[in-house]
Every structure is written in C-alpha cells, then in structure tokens.
C-alpha cells in the first residue's frame, strides 16, 4: 500500500541536527503534506529523498526498492520527480526544451544517434514531442509560451513550466517544494487545480511542502508536522489542527501562572 | 516578407530550416560556396581554407564551453593531437587521408576524455586550470617526443589525395574543407535536437537540478569533452593536410585563447555564432593588414608605428563587441533578420 517508506532519517550539518529520527510512510495516490515553521527541516527531507543530501542514518524504500544510497539520477529514473522552492529551470532553453529535458531518463538516444539524428533518434524525438504536446502542454495550458525562453516568463508561469518538466519525468511520486509561494490568489487557484487534476487523472502520489495553510488544509489527505527536525504530529488536516504540539510550535505556549 | 507560418506536423515544426524562405537562402548560400573557388584566386582560397578549419575547431569548442559550460584552455592542444596523429599515420603507415581524418578525431577524443575525467570532482575555474595543464603537457610532448613528433623541427607530409584526386592544391582542398565544415555543423546542430544536447545545456545552466532530472553529470561531461576534442582532431587533420607541415609552434596557448575568443565573439552556445566567430577572428586580422598595406604606400615611414597598431585595433574590436553585443554576432544576425522579416512594412 505504501509507495514510499522512510525510516529513522537522520541528517546533520556539523553540530546542527537538521533531521532527527524522522519516519513516515506515504500511501499510493495520496497528497501528503509536510509543514512546519522555518528551518524545521522540510526541504532537507525532500533533498534526502531526491538524493541531493546523503543522510547519515535511515532507510528510504521507494516502491520496493531501497534507494537510501542511490545517486540522484538513478532515483529520477525510478520515478521520483521534484519541483523547487526557488525555481530551478534551465534559463538558456525554451519552455519546450525544458519540458523535453524532464523526459531525459526515458529516452535512449546515444551520442552517435544524436550526431546523426537519423532513424530511431528522429522517431524518438517526434514521439516525445507528440506526447508532451498531448499530455503536458495542453493539460497545463502553456501552448502560447512553448517556444519562449524561460528566463522571459512571469513567475507564476515559470512555476507551471517547472511542474510540466516534472511531469515529463513520468514520475510515480512528485515532490513539490512550495508550489504556490509568492503567487497571487488567482495563480494559486490555478496551481491547486493542476495539482488536484494530476493526482486524480494520473494517480500520482504527491508530497508537498507549503506555508499556505488554507491550501494545505484543503487539499492534503495527510499532514506531517515537523519542528526542529523532529516529527511532532501526523494525521488528517483536522487532527493536525487540533494537535497540542502543533499549536505549541506555531502559536507558542501559554505562559504558566506563577 | 514572410506572412503566416503554419505547420501541420511536429516534424515540420522541429525542422532546422523550417520555412521555405530560409531553405531558399540556404540554397543560395550553397550555390555561392560552389562557384566561389572558380572565381577566387590562390590567396582567397587559402583564406577560405584556414577559415573553414577554424570553423570546425570552433564548433568543437562551442559544444564543450558554449553549450556544456566547461571552459577549456586546451583546445589548441587537441587540434595539435589531431594534426600529429594524422601526420604520423600518413608518414609511417601511409594511410590515406580519408582514413586519417576519423582516426585523428578519435585520437583527440581519447585524450579529451582523459583530460575531462577530473570534471567528475571539479568544475568552473578549477576544471579550467586542468585544461590549461593539459595544454602545457601536450605542448611539452609535441616538442620533446622527438622520435614521434620530430621535435621543434616538426613533421612534413606529402600532398594528400582523395579518390585519386590531388587535394594538395588550395582549390582541391577547398572542397574537402567545405564538406567537412557542412558535416561538422550538421552534427553539432543535430546534437542539440536530442537529449544529449539538452543535457549539455542543462549542465551549464544548473548542474544540480540537471542531476535531479536524471542526467548522469559525469557521463555527459565526458561526452562533451569527447565530441569537442573529436572535432578539434578533425580540424587538426585538415590543418596538417592543408599546410603539409607542422611544428609545436602552431598550437600554443594563445591559439587556445583565440578559439575561446571565437565562440565568445560569435555568441556562446550558438552554432551559427561559432561559425561567425571563426570567420571574424580569421578574416579581420587579414582585413586590417590589407588596410595597413594601403597606408604603407602613402606613408612608408609610418609602418613601424602602424604595424603593432594592428593588434591593438583587433583587440579593441573584440572589446567593443563584448560591450555592445554581449550575445555575439549570432544575436546581431537575428536582429537584422527580424528587421527584414517585416520589411518594408514595419507595423
């Protein structure tokens, strides 16, 4: 049932304990949110999952495969895609090329095939283009910008292109780091609509980090709350909202009467 | 003027020359290139040949430095390896030109991969210094491995032949250069239509997220080194068969820097840019020299002062380019094209 199981994740930078014994598991097809105050270790979890950080201890099991020590490109090929908090698109490329790049691990063209661009390499590129047009560009409504360099696009659109690139990776799990940070109400609504559609139509599992509490409470199936690198609560939005530890982390403690 | 631009298939949309207008001009260019040798004299043909060789080398460096973002200060050494390989193969084993050409490329590619290996751990300026070291080391071998390279006296080779034709003349060699340039440009362009070229650019733009996208950074950096030095080796083979002699002095560090200047002036990461840059860097010094000769006739005594000025003017031109046209000649060309696209109806 669980597509991702994380056991006893431990990470520190020098003397700073970033993640302390964090365990959780994500069910297939759910939207799983990770929230917590700044510096709680949310992005560090995504970085450990993606392979950008190497945890000191802990096991990560992804769909039956132990990926605890795998390289980032291997994890991507297995079906772990990621969007970033501060947009990490390739600025020198067009929107279309950025999206095509997401499919990298699923293509087969080698150096020689690429140089000749003949036969299989050509067919593969055409099939890729058609698939991207039908399944991603139409879906995310970015037809009008497909030939533009990403550096010229507005912030909300860049976020959408990043999502498109992640979808092109044909992931099983989509890791989204603050997908609506810095967006206005309309852009946020668009993004939420896309996230829900993705989950529903593609049966994707989504792990999401976000500070926009209203959005998180609306769309998540389950929420994990982190504080100072420790998991302090986990459960449905209602459960989490009333959890005393969560209230303490977010609102502070009542000063005791002397 | 071009109106409307409709396509009915993705293949048509992905074509390099996607409009009939661009195909028309491309055809025109080929016709010009085909009649040029019949009109031009020895000197112009010589210029065309060395420009073509520079284009092939610049296309190579453009893949490594322009697209994949790995600055190389050793490109001239790779051209040198190709040249020496070709000369040694032709002299000792009497291999024909057509066989020397790919073997020279392969030899350079092999050493390119060796030099690129540290890129697993190093990037940016540190990797740049590694390539500088490679330049110095290979130069050392060119000079001191006398039994193979002939030391500072270098090597001479016989005039090459191709399918029984003598290509030792400027006229004959022009066709070889032309074909190789066309193939090299096509191959470079093709790379960037597939995942390989996209991976190169991704590594340049943001290597960390490239890795998270599933790109094996080390492998693709080595690919970039291999293709880049392969083209350098091809250029080297052309070089030695054109001049029919080589010495270590032909491939010094400042030649490497000249290749870098070509792709920067032309527009980094741009294939047309590499071509324009190579033409610019090869022809402008000659043009300046011609202008000087003109002055020499009027003021013969001014030469001692004017002659060094040539380099100054050349350098100044490059600086002007970088200030006013940071994206290079290729960008300038795009603007001119866009201007004429709607000409004469501007709005």
Image: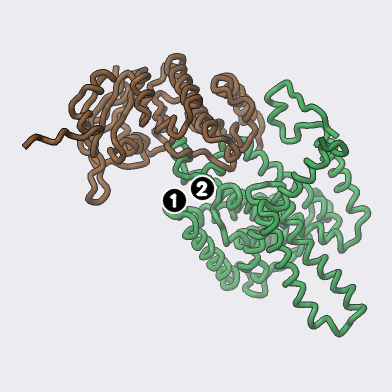
Q: Nearer the viewer, residue A30 or B346?
A: B346
Quadrant in the picture for residue B5: top right
Is residue A81 depicted above or below B167 in this figure? Answer: above
Q: Quadrant of the N terminus of chain A?
A: top left
Q: Quadrant of the C terminus of chain A?
A: top left
Give left or right: position of B251 versus A186: right
Q: Have a look at marks 2 and 1 and say if they share a chain.
A: yes
Residue A195 image position (x, y, % from top left): 44, 21
Secondary structure at badge 2 equals helix
Residue of label 2: B221
Distance from label 2 to label 1 (Cα)? 8 Å
Give left or right: position of B339 versus B328: right
Secondary structure at badge 1 equals helix
Q: Nearer the viewer, residue A218 or A161?
A: A218
Residue B100 in sight in this render: no
Residue shown at the point (81%, 68%) measured from the top left: B288
Q: What chain letter is assigned to the residue under label 1?
A: B
Tag on residue A183?
Answer: none
Residue A255 image position (x, y, % from top left): 14, 36
In the figure, the shade used to draw chain A is brown
Is residue A67 depicted above or below B261 in this figure? Answer: above
Give left or right: position of B325 versus A175: right
Tag on residue B120?
Answer: 1
């Amino acid at each position: 049932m669980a597509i991702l199981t994380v056991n006893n994740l431990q990470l520190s930078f020098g003397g700073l304990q970033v993640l302390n014994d964090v365990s959780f598991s994500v069910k297939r097809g759910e939207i799983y949110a990770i929230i917590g105050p700044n510096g709680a270790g949310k992005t560090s979890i995504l970085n450990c999952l993606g392979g950008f950080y190497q945890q000191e201890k802990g096991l990560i099991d992804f769909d039956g495969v132990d990926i605890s020590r795998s390289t980032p490109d291997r994890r991507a090929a297995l079906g772990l895609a990621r969007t970033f908090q501060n947009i990490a698109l390739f600025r020198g490329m067009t929107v279309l090329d950025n999206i095509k790049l997401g499919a990298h691990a699923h293509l087969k063209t080698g150096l020689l095939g690429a140089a000749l661009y003949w036969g299989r390499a050509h067919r593969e590129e055409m099939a890729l283009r058609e698939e991207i047009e039908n399944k991603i560009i139409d879906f995310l409504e970015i037809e009008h910008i497909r030939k533009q360099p990403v550096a010229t696009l507005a912030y909300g659109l860049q976020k959408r292109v990043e999502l498109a690139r992640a979808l092109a990776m044909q992931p099983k799990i989509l890791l989204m780091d603050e997908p609506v940070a810095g967006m206005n109400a309309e852009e946020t609504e668009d993004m939420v609509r896309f996230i829900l559609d993705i989950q529903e139509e593609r049966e994707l599992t989504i792990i999401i980090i976000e500070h926009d509490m209203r959005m998180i409470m609306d769309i998540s199936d389950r929420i994990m709350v982190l504080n100072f690198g420790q998991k302090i609560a986990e459960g449905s939005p209602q459960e989490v909202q009333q959890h005393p530890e969560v209230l303490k982390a977010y609102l502070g403690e009542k000063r005791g009467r002397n | 003027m071009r109106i409307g631009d409709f396509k009915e298939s993705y293949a048509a949309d992905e074509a390099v020359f996607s409009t009939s207008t661009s195909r028309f001009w491309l055809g025109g260019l080929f016709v010009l290139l085909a009649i040029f040798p019949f009109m031009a004299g020895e000197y112009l043909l010589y210029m065309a040949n060395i420009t073509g060789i520079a284009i092939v080398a610049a296309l190579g460096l453009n893949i490594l430095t322009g697209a994949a973002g790995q600055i190389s200060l050793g490109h001239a050494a790779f051209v040198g390896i190709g040249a020496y390989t070709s000369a040694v193969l032709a002299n000792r084993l009497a291999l024909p030109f057509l066989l020397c050409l790919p073997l020279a490329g392969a030899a350079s590619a092999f050493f390119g991969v060796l030099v690129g290996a540290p890129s697993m751990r190093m990037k940016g300026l540190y990797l740049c210094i590694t390539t500088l070291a490679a330049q110095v080391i290979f130069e050392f071998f060119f000079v001191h491995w006398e039994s193979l390279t002939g030391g500072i006296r270098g090597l001479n080779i016989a005039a090459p032949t191709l399918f029984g034709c003598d290509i030792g003349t400027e006229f004959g060699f022009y066709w070889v250069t032309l074909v190789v340039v066309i193939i090299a440009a096509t191959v470079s362009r093709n790379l960037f239509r597939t995942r390989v070229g996209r991976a190169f650019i991704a590594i340049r733009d943001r290597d960390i997220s490239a890795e998270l996208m599933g790109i094996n950074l080390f492998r693709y950096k080595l690919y970039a080194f291999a293709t880049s030095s392969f083209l350098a080796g091809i250029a080297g083979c052309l070089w030695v068969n054109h001049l029919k002699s080589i010495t270590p002095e032909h491939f010094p560090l400042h030649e490497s820097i000249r290749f870098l200047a070509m792709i920067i002036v032309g527009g980094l990461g741009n294939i047309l840019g590499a071509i324009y840059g190579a033409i610019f860097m090869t022809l402008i010094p000659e043009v300046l020299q011609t202008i000087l000769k003109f002055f020499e006739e009027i003021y013969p005594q001014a030469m001692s002062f004017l002659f060094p000025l040539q380099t100054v003017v050349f350098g100044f031109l490059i600086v002007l380019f970088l200030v006013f046209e940071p994206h290079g000649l290729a960008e300038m060309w795009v603007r001119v094209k866009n201007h004429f696209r709607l000409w004469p109806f501007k709005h």
